[in-house]
Image: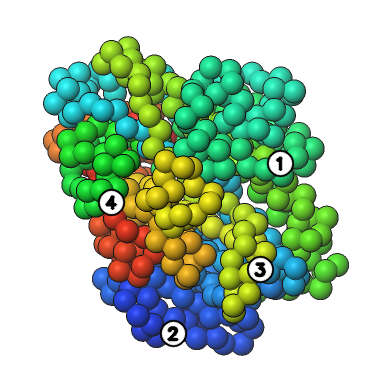
Amino acid sequence: MTRADTRGRRAKPRLEPAGPSRWKIPMTEGMRVPGVVFASPDLLPAIEDDESLQQVVNVACLPGVVGASYAMPDVHWGYGFPIGGVAATDVEAGGVVSPGGVGFDISCGVRLLTTGLGGEEVSGCLDRLMDRLAEQVPCGLGRGGVWSRRSDPELDDILVRGAVVAVEAGFGFDGDLVNCEDRGSLGGADPAKVSVRARERGRNQVGSLGSGNHFVEVQVVDRILDGRRADAFGLRVGEVCVMIHTGSRGLGHQVCTDHIHVMEASMARYGVSVPDRQLACAPVRSEEGAAYLAAMAAAANYGRTNRQLLTHAVRHVFGEVLGTGDLPLLYDVSHNLAKLEVHEIEGERRLLCVHRKGATRALPPGHVELPEGLRRWGQPVLVPGSMGTASYVLVGTGSSAGFDSCCHGAGRVLSRHAAKRRVRGDELARGLAAEGIHVRAGSMRGLAEEAPFAYKDVDSVVSACEEAGLAHVVARMRPVGVVKG
């Protein structure tokens, strides 16, 4: 069912307390697993006010789903899956993959650069810094990119090898790949599964911010909550960092659209039925499932290349304005992806297709997939706040719940239209400037859509993640300048 179909026709799913910042949705007709919602009591009213809980229930009906249908503290209504939803299906037992469990912005993600600069070293030239970032970072709907007009062979190379291609071309360093999820390149990509239309949409956008909630944000560390890990990550109070948030742009959107249509047409052939057509899916071990995963991996590699090229642009500006472009990458992680992973289910190691939509991977200390320099400490989990509010660095804890996942941000409570009705972009920009936050935006209407009041309190979201055992808080950053898509 669509959002309009569900409103008013079903009783809201019932939540039962299941531990600190943890609630259970008991199994009802059609559910193969229960729902689990991670949230503190103060976050529940916003969660219960939209249709995201019904979407948690719907996801629990997918063929092959195991464990539970999970919702992170930033959960809100999305396409098919809620944003902030996590679910895994058993690949060898007919488990399905659903494009709605990844979303339209495939491999949208976040990376954090450290600078070694103190806030006082940057404050005097912050206006110029933000002006140059706005000039050097292409942003807005349909705008070109840092590295445009890729030929078909060049684009194929990006789709197959991701950020590796950008680094080899001089847009970064080997260390960038070491500290990027999957070393910047997700395996299994097949450009042949990416449509001509998707290619055309992505050809001139690689190395661009896009629109919506994407941003390049200059931040200052204002609180350290785990000194040992903060030292290991190169974070100290007063230090300037740069956070980059963007994804696979029009190419990823088109990949999702194309494969949703394919799966809608194929479900009957596999005897698959779902409670919401937006959950269109196919078995992982099917031609359609394999084609989607191959195209999704290609789009993910495009997204990682995108963030790598923006990193190059940021370093260039810092070198020009502040005399240093040495901005090491702490970590880069996606929050819209489906990955084949091995997890323990009922005492048995099983191959699962783990969907994370608006949720980030949160690997624990010692995990073999972490780079050597981070393995002792755990994977950095990067959680941006809403514009004008704090962002966080956390680390994974290895929670058995949620398949090593955590929140990805604050989570919307107001639609973009509702936000625009409450504030004008120029008013918002003046208010942020009064708080010492230098904003550069291509559109005042777009800026209004991202007003801080349109989102949950990120402090509460992060606190709920820690209380539920999903991740551990390391440091908090406050914004001083932002370039918005």
Number of residues whose C-alpha sits closer than 10 Å to that of mark 3, classed few (under 14), some (14–19) or many (20 or more): some
Closer to the camera: disc 4 or disc 1?
4
Closer to the camera: disc 1 or disc 3?
3
| Residue 189 numbered mark, or none | 1
Residue at the image position 24 percent from the left and 52 percent from the top: 226
Secondary element type, mark 4: strand
Quarter holding residue 204:
top right
- Disc 2 and disc 1: Cα gap in Å? 40 Å
Residue at the image position 39 percent from the left and 16 percent from the top: 316
Of label 3 and label 4, which has the lower sequence position? Answer: 3
For residue 65, side relative to residue 17 (left or right): right
Of label 2 and label 4, which has the lower sequence position? Answer: 2
Residue 192 pos. (x, y %):
79, 37
Q: Label 4 is placed on what type of residue? A: Val
Secondary element type, mark 2: loop
Closer to the camera: disc 2 or disc 1?
1
Colour option used = rainbow
Q: Label 1 is placed on what type of residue? A: Ala
**In terms of depth relative to the viewer, which is nearer, 365 or 250?**
365
Q: Label 2 is placed on what type of residue? A: Arg
For residue 52, side relative to residue 445 (left or right): right
| Residue 474 numbered mark, or none | 4
For residue 307, side relative to residue 261 (left or right): left
Q: Which residue is mark 2?
A: 14
For the N terminus, give its image quadrant: bottom right
Residue 43 pos. (x, y %):
31, 68
